[in-house]
Image: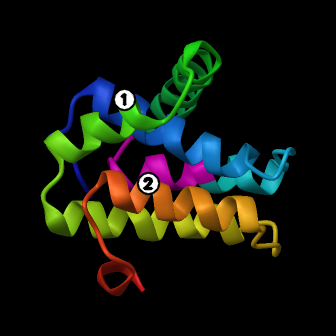
Amino acid sequence: MKTNFTTQVQISSAALLLKVASSDDKTDLIELNEIEEILYDYFDLSKSQSQDILKNAKIEVEKSIDIFNFGEILNNSFDKEDKIEFVKCVLDVAHADDHYDHRERHLVSKIADILNLTKEDYL
């Protein structure tokens, strides 16, 4: 449980998770539920707070042109252990619909790169 991160870090985390969920051109309810659960657990938020963060993240994703800014916020806020835990959460979202698409795989790799992680760090 991470309680010391800013709302911007939480929104950036949720935005990256949303990008992964939608990278296969569809976002399933099971993926959205997984994201809410991750926000709830990872940041020690209430269900209501998780939903608010997710709502704000959706707005930020719509305004964004890429994932770099979201990743950079996390890169500057997370230590290596946090980064590894987060990429594992990203993988949980990618696998939530029981279909690990090549676009999801590419995005997971891209997020890990932004966070300066190697595959060996999170697999």
Mark 2 residue crowding within 10 angstroms, few (<14) / some (14–19) / many (20+): many
Q: Is residue 41 magenta?
A: yes
In screen coordinates, is 90 left or right of 26? Answer: left
| Position above or below: 3 against 118 | above
Mark 1 residue crowding within 10 angstroms, few (<14) / some (14–19) / many (20+): some
Residue at x 82% of width, y 48% of height: 29
In screen coordinates, is 19 left or right of 22? Answer: left
Label 2, on which residue? Answer: 111
- Where is residue 117 drawn, in percent x and y? 28, 68
> Which of the marked residues, 1 or 2, is nearer the chain's N terminus?
1
Residue 50 showing in the rendered view? yes
- Where is residue 82 drawn, in percent x and y? 23, 61
Residue 3 showing in the rendered view? no
In screen coordinates, is 53 left or right of 102? Answer: left
Label 1, on which residue? Answer: 69
Q: Quadrant of the C terminus?
A: bottom left
Q: Quadrant of the N terminus?
A: bottom left
| Position above or below: 96 against 38 | below
Quarter holding residue 84: bottom left
Residue at x 62% of width, y 41% of height: 18
- Magenta part, dominant SS: helix
Q: Amino acid at mark 1?
A: Asn
Which stretch is magenta? 35-45
